[in-house]
Amino acid sequence: MCYNKRIVIFKGLQSWFVRLLVLILLALNLLACAQPTPFALESASWRLSLKENGQIRELWIRRADRWDPVVFREDTYAGISWYGVWDQKNRVIALSRKTGSTFAGKSEGLSFTLTYQLVDKNLVIHAGVKNERTTIFKPEKLGVIMGISHYMVNYPQWNAVYFPTLLRSEQTHFWGYFMNPNGQVIGLASPDPIASWSLNYNFGYGSKEIFFWGHRVYTTNLDLLNSLPLPDRHPQHLVQLHPGEEKNWTLFLTDIEKLDDIQPVLSSLSRAPLFRIPETTIEEGRSANIEIFSTDPVASLEIKGPEGRREILTLPPHDKGVYHLDVHPKGGYGPFRVIASTASGKRTEAVISVRKPWSWYMQRAREGAHTYTQKASWNCENWYGFHSMFLAQKYFPVKSMNDKANERFNLVYGLMYDDKKREPTRNADRIQNTASIIGILTDKYEAQGDVKDLERAADLADWIIRNSQTADGAYRRGKTHYTSVIYPAKSIMELLIAEKKLASKGNIWEKRYERHLGSVRKAIGQLMNGPGAVDTEGEMTYEDGMISCSALQIAEFGLLEESDENRKKYISMAKQYLMGHRCLTQLVVPDSRQRGGTLRFWEAQYDVLMAHNMITSPHGWSSWRTYATYYLYLLTGEESWLVETMNALGSAMQIIDHKTGALRWAFVVDPHVRTSQISENFPGTDPDKFNANQFKAEEGNHRPVTVGEQYVPMIADWFYANSSDNDVHEHFKCLEEVALAAAYVVERPDGTLKGYNCTVSRSDDRVVRIKPLEGIVNRVHVNLRQVSDLVVHWKRGETRYRNVDKKQWLGKDPYRL
């Protein structure tokens, strides 16, 4: 009886519960129906959903048999959104759906529209603005926040995050692309002139006392109107709207399979000619091969020299939408502007540089190292110019300059190191400081021959190993991975090469050599775990130097490796690092001032005390990638790595003014950055004393500055507190290792010979003759496809080499241990 009663009660409860559940579900359904339904568009190539305010909720690209997401921001940088800066205020304009995929809104006497379309393989955005005021509207900026997230946080998240690798305004159109470490590319183009562009850099990490601009980027802005000044190549008239004036722009986003497709695809979308220039810096008397992609015939092609000389070039036939020609710049050294124009009025620019002899740059760098004070301070960038001082002395001995270099080095070294204990007395945890001193002491030894310098370097290497190398092989600062902060393993490898020459069985140099080689082998072994196994100082991100320094150290160790099987492993891993790193490298830009530069953007605050982030490319640390491509060329013989090496090195050398010889800090890529810069030295600082004042760009007196697509001067000649602008000397350290005293000969598949820093020809008797361009060249690397006899015209006289094949060094082999 009780049992049956329980069943009846349970049935009653069950019925009540079911009714309540149904009511809850109905309420949730009604609530869901009350929410705005996302508007969706889909084609064979794109799938997107839109919010009611016109921003993109989700975006997907069809690739092969899958849909790949493009991450959009959900914060104040969400897009696509109209935004502006005027009356010293930032504004984001609220839109609402007008009809279908069109959105509209009004703000302060301006009306705005956004419309989305899927056309062929492209996502098309139409943006319009009208001035309904009775007065001229002249903002600082007015444009659209793209909203594509560039925010790289950690591994493996960053592999799918697109970086703004290239953004380029031309007078009549716009083009560029976003790329991620996975190698996926989204092209961006507009057939309409766009005044400028800007990036939304993150701000804020560090202590309450010292704030740093961060190491990440939120998203990109296309600044459709922008105040002046702007680079000459940009449209100069897009600064205002008259009463009643309306302007409209069309933007294309498109999936691009590989880098070589960028110019032909974006030329078609922008309806403008675009340049592809394989070699952007050339030797005097050489020609530059260029391609111009253009759906419309090019009506004129002009070249403007650095001294003002102008020449109209003859165009070859228009072959399937592309022109192929060789350009012979005439009229001196420096940057030559090449301008292509169509009859319809489209105009595109490129820059090719004619370089001076490599030796000229090395000597100017030494002069710059003396002018811009090498000083004892918190980080090695303050004294990096010692590399240029001692490396120049190896080839161009000048006693007076060498005496000055020794005097300055002894002062700086004495302020930071205990020479009896052979250990740092300041900032010991910054192991890259001591690693850099090891490299400088090795350079000093090679320039002057005093073995005491090499002994100091060897003892300091032992100190690093004892105090920072952990069981897995990595060099660490506390728990932070530091093998790839600058390059401690490379600095020890430079020492190894010098030690090997002094080593004989059982002597102290052999023991040092074996100890240091073992340490480096362990460090490289740890890097072989891949990009997810490395770290960096400051704020974690997919950091330029973290990746390039890993690649260069692995590849250099591959050159020291005897086993072919192991070499293949090092080659494979170095390539893996560099292939991902392409999204941070200027491999497409047709501009010899930038080609090969890496996209660093947080250095201005440290180096020249400018109070804002900006892309500096090339920056001194861009040359880290140049070492890596150089080593990979020597390992593989693939000429594309050599071309990248020479392009990057050529761009880096333009840091020195070709007219005055003045050393400059870096090239700023952003077209328009309003900021401030320190204008006087901090009171009480002394260049002859250790100065621990660090990174306080917000202190002291400042002056307002606007910079854009230009070189920035050094400050170390008058600013004696901590500044890092002497990191520019990495370019010249790289120059000495790669090209100063070296020439290269490549035999291409068709049998033609190409020489770098030399002339090369094959005589009637099939002998290959090589003549270096400078007398200081002491080695030639040949990369041949057939066995040949070679004659090298060294400064000391001719030398004949018989039956040379494959790739090898003639003369000095700098990497044979």
Image (cartoon, rainbow, N blue to C red):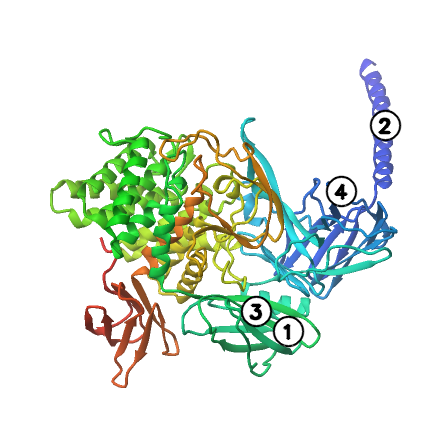
Marking on residue 20: 2
Locate residue 637, reporting x and y percent.
Answer: 35, 65
Instruction: Specify which label sits upstream in the sequence, 1 or 4.
Output: 4
Check disc 2 and report its element: helix, strand or loop: helix
Q: Amino acid at mark 4?
A: Asp
Check disc 3 and report its element: helix, strand or loop: strand
Marking on residue 275: 3
Circle 1 is placed at which residue position?
Answer: 341
Query: Which of the two discs, 3 and 1, sits closer to the camera?
Result: 1
Residue 671 drawn above or below residue 799: above
Residue occupying image coordinates x 76% and y 42%: 87
Instruction: Specify which label sits upstream in the sequence, 3 or 2.
Output: 2
Marking on residue 87: 4
Q: Amino acid at mark 1?
A: Ser
Q: Amino acid at mark 3?
A: Phe
Marking on residue 691: none
Tell me the distance, in whole angstroms, between the alpha carbons under discs 3 and 2: 69 Å
Tell me the distance, in whole angstroms, between the alpha carbons under discs 1 and 4: 38 Å
Locate residue 599, reporting x and y percent.
Answer: 52, 51
Query: Which of the two discs, 1 and 2, sits closer to the camera?
Result: 1
Instruction: Specify which label sits upstream in the sequence, 4 or 3.
Output: 4
